[in-house]
Image (cartoon, rainbow, N blue to C red):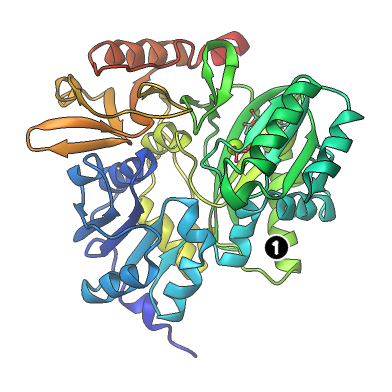
């Protein structure tokens, strides 16, 4: 028998953990690990003031892979968990594994599912995963030709990574041409927009399903719904996400079954048939129309802000789940959930998503320190001695929980009222769709 030295050193309860990333998602992961598991020491690279409540933050960028490897060796890290997409696209998982370091995340080949939308669409087409029909364009002229003869709305997507801002739903030709000009000529997303995917518009309501996978078993988490556009009523440009709630009532048990059978299993089997070991976290962005789910996109990591509402509901020891992913024994894990609902309202800084503001003083966060049902997940923040300052577009996620989605909405907005910073803006209708469905 071949003994895997990586396994023998991961004793649950005394593990040293390295979490990579600096957003609300990473604060949420750190919080959930602490709530469900015990460990020896947790580090976050580079982290934020929120992750610092649980971890020692270390000033290593999430894309400095050799720096992260050296740190993991120096601190005898037993398990590394990757939050954001950028290091995954750079191949952090392959490089850690080559060094014999245990890590939760997809290999670079699997991460293409997120780092190239054209790659993802071709994969879905090949394995019959329901999704919008599409074309790929490498030149501005050919893309303009195409939209000149298409029907609206139509959806234009930068092929590469664009921090959740690379997709525009266009309602007329003028908008489509402007979008193509921005992406392909003015390069607002740099190389990520050199190639575009143009796809048919899917109607319906969106929901997100996260799942853990070790390549053989895929375990869905409880459902959630994000709110991408910046303004109420889903108006305005797309953002990284303005809020979320869980569970999403649109994901009925019948829809869940279809997601497992028609989406998650074909994803797993498709990866297998391409010889790619799929491991880590899968995120399926869904459009559900009349009970029929199709895929808007797959991500290969925890969603932000969905994680903020899904992980607080998890009862199962999260470190044990991560260990099971690394050791290929996810079939032994049974996920258990709290019954409450959770709502996260994102408070953004002035100008977001077009720009963002930095250095404004945030007040009120500590007034929630003692609450069991309301808490703040930090994203674009910075600690400056005693003051918490804004430091990015999405500043905070304010989470409220409750026995129903209505109660959770009330709880989160009540908490939002306690927090202030110059130029703060947030949507007032997070969760409203869930109330309508019930
Ligand atoms: N085919 C489509 N039909 C309707 N809306 C879409 C479609 N594709 C994307 N969208 C909208 O744009 C958002 C962002 O698209 P997505 O593919 O998830 O890219 P990303 O999350 O990388 O920005 C989606 O959440 C959805 O609101
Ligand atoms: Mg998306």
Q: Which residue is mark 1?
A: 271
* Residue positioned 80% across, 47% down in the render: 137
Using the image as rendered, state which of residue 227 and residue 67 is in the foreground. Answer: 67
Q: Position of residue 405 (x, y in %)?
A: 46, 16
* Placement of 69 over or under 157, stated as above or below: below
* Placement of 10 over or under 142, stated as above or below: below
128 lies left or right of 426: right
* Residue positioned 72% across, 23% down in the render: 175
Is residue 178 something that shows in the picture?
yes
Circle count: 1
359 lies left or right of 243: left
Using the image as rendered, state which of residue 22 and residue 216 is in the foreground. Answer: 22
Tell me the quadrant of the picture where the C terminus can be found: top right
Determine the quadrant in which ligand 1 lies.
top right
* Residue positioned 74% across, 38% down in the render: 258
Residue farthest to the front?
Answer: 186
Mark 1, residues whose alpha carbon is within 10 Å: few (<14), some, or many (≥20)?
A: some
């Amino acid at each position: 028998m071949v003994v895997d030295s990586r396994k023998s050193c991961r004793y649950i309860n005394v593990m040293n953990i390295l979490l990579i990333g600096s957003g609300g998602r990473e604060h949420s992961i750190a919080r959930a690990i602490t709530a469900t598991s015990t460990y020896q020491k947790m580090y976050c690279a580079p982290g934020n003031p929120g992750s610092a409540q649980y971890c020692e933050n270390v000033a290593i960028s999430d894309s400095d892979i050799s720096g992260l490897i050296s740190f993991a060796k120096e601190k005898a890290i037993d398990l590394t968990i990757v939050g954001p997409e950028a290091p995954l696209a750079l191949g952090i998982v392959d490089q850690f594994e080559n060094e014999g370091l245990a890590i939760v995340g997809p290999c670079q080949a699997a991460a293409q599912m997120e780092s190239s939308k054209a790659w993802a669409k071709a994969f879905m087409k090949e394995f019959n995963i329901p999704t919008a029909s599409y074309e790929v364009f490498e030149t501005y002229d050919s893309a303009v030709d195409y939209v000149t003869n298409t029907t609206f709305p139509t959806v234009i997507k930068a092929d590469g990574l664009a921090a959740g801002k690379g997709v525009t739903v266009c309602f007329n030709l003028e908008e489509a041409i402007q979008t193509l000009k921005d992406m392909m000529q003015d390069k607002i997303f740099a190389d990520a927009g050199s190639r575009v995917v143009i796809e048919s518009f899917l109607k319906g309501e969106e929901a997100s399903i996260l799942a853990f996978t070790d390549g053989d078993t895929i375990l869905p988490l409880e459902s959630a719904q994000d709110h991408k556009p910046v303004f109420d009523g889903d108006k305005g440009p797309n953002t990284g996400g303005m809020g979320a709630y869980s569970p999403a009532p649109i994901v009925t048990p019948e829809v869940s079954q279809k997601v497992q059978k028609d989406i998650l299993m074909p994803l797993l089997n498709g990866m297998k048939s391409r010889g790619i070991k799929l491991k880590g976290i899968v995120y399926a962005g869904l459009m559900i129309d009349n009970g029929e789910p199709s895929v808007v996109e797959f991500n290969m990591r925890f969603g932000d802000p969905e994680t903020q509402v899904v992980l607080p509901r998890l009862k199962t020891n999260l470190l044990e789940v991560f260990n099971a992913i690394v050791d290929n024994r996810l079939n032994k894990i049974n996920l258990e959930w709290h019954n409450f609902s959770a709502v996260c309202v994102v408070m953004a800084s002035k100008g977001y998503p077009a720009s963002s503001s930095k250095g404004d003083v945030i007040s009120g966060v500590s007034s929630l320190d003692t609450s069991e049902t309301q808490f703040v997940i930090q994203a674009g923040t910075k600690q400056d001695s005693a003051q918490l300052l804004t430091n990015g577009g999405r500043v905070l996620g304010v989470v409220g929980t409750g026995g129903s989605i209505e109660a959770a909405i009330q709880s989160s907005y009540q908490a939002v009222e306690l927090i202030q910073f110059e130029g703060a803006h947030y949507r007032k209708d997070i969760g409203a769709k869930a109330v309508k469905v019930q």
